Amino acid sequence: MSAFSGPGLSIAAERVAAALRAIAPRAADHTAAVKPRLERVLAAFAAERLGVHHFATVSGYGHGDLGRATLDRVFARVLQAEAAAVRLQFVSGTHAIAAALFGVLRPGDRLLSLTGRPYDTLEEVIGLRGHGSGSLAEFGITYDELPLRPDGQVDGDRLEEALAPPTRMVLIQRSCGYSWRPSLPVRRIGELCHRVKELRPDCLCFVDNCYGELVQDLEPTAVGADLMAGSLIKNLGGTVAPGGGYVAGRAELVEQACCRLTAPGIGSEGGSAFDQQRLLFQGLFLAPQMVAEALIGAELVAQVFADLGFAVNPQPGAERSDGIQAVKFGSPEALKLVCRAFQAASPVGSYLDPVPAPMPGYATELVMAGGTFIDGSTSEFSADAPLREPYVLYAQGGTHHSHQQIALERALEALAAASLIRI
């Protein structure tokens, strides 16, 4: 069928424009939230007396780097934590999380996931897949998980039973990851941390905070989390950080994570920023605005596909705790068509055809659309999906929601041309 209703007027464009009008009140709320979160960033810069001299870095070992120390303190203030370590040496959010887990846990300890099965890339870190690469399991750290309720929520009624064995740490994944479940609001994370401490005062609460930073007014470390970690090519990098990640929380735990990143005795005192410090500060300055644009884009994706009858998570208008929008397509053909359309609307590599392929750390082949200026950046607009039933697309990021609007128009035209939808 044709996707056009007249000369130069696309039915797909009309459909997306109607969705944009529908989300206008929610978009206004996300825009209004930029100011208080930017004020928090500016207050941190002012408190730490940020100056141009902090943009310079030292070479070699990285000892005595004034800018790096200031960046750590700024991030700690913004993340409402006692301490933070921001390092380009973290190659991903998974790496930062792994450093935290290996840094704090010891042989014989028990790790309990409160949010069901964690994100795919943590399965080999824990030892749920693969062997011989030095997983937590190979170091004698036991792992259990509390299955989610049928509605995707944490099963609070079974929490006491799950914590009955001695438990050193609970893992809370804020984002839905590749699961069809609600992402956890910060207030719910706080409730879980409070309950864990009631049942086991010596148990540590660790949060995988990827995709969640600056989405809500508080961060997990403000409501009881002992430690958390994330990536700089997600929210806090503001789309300009060239790489890296962070850990934040109690000072002694942050240091233990850094000792795993570098070496015992070096810890947080090592690591050059390779003259990229300015971009890390600037990315944090831009982050509140970029997060808001990503959230508006996620609202638009949800509205467009919900209007067409697809299942979406979160639902249009629902509370958001991260920047991920999931759409259940139910068929690999539709999934691949949408990814191709998004890739064709990308600023970088628009000529590429995303095809399913193996990806390090993942259990199944992935199809990914991500023509981003920073390779793999999910703070820029991208979408990816494990090629497995029920064929769910996970869209995230975006520097301005007009980009998502253009990509969605192309996706609808491609789906209509393949007779997979009627618009």
Image: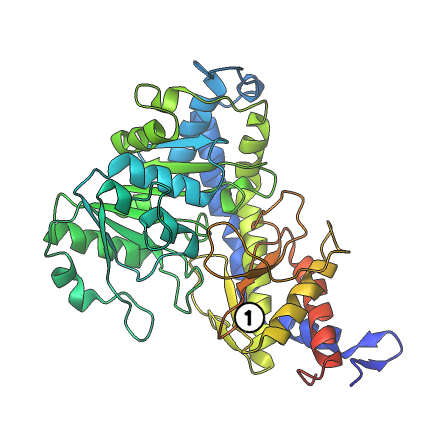
Residue 190 in the image: state x and y as whole percent.
Answer: 26, 53
Residue 387 position in % (x across, y down): 54, 67
Q: Is residue 172 left or right of residue 164?
A: right
Q: Secondary structure at mark 1?
A: helix
Residue occupying image coordinates x 55% and y 70%: 302
Residue depicted at x 35% and y 24%: 263
- Where the N terminus falls, by quadrant? bottom right
Residue at 47% across / 73% down in the picture? 315
Which residue lies at the image location 59% right of the left edge and 58% below the top edge? 357
Foreground residue, 80 or 36? 80
Question: Pointer 1: residues within 10 angstroms few (<14), some, or many (20+)?
Answer: many
Which quadrant would residue 341 be assigned to in this image? Answer: bottom right
Q: Nearer the viewer, residue 127 or 94?
A: 127
Residue 418: % across, % down: 72, 80
Above/below status of 251 relative to 305: above
Q: Which residue is the extreme one toward the right?
A: 7
Figure quadrant of residue 13: bottom right
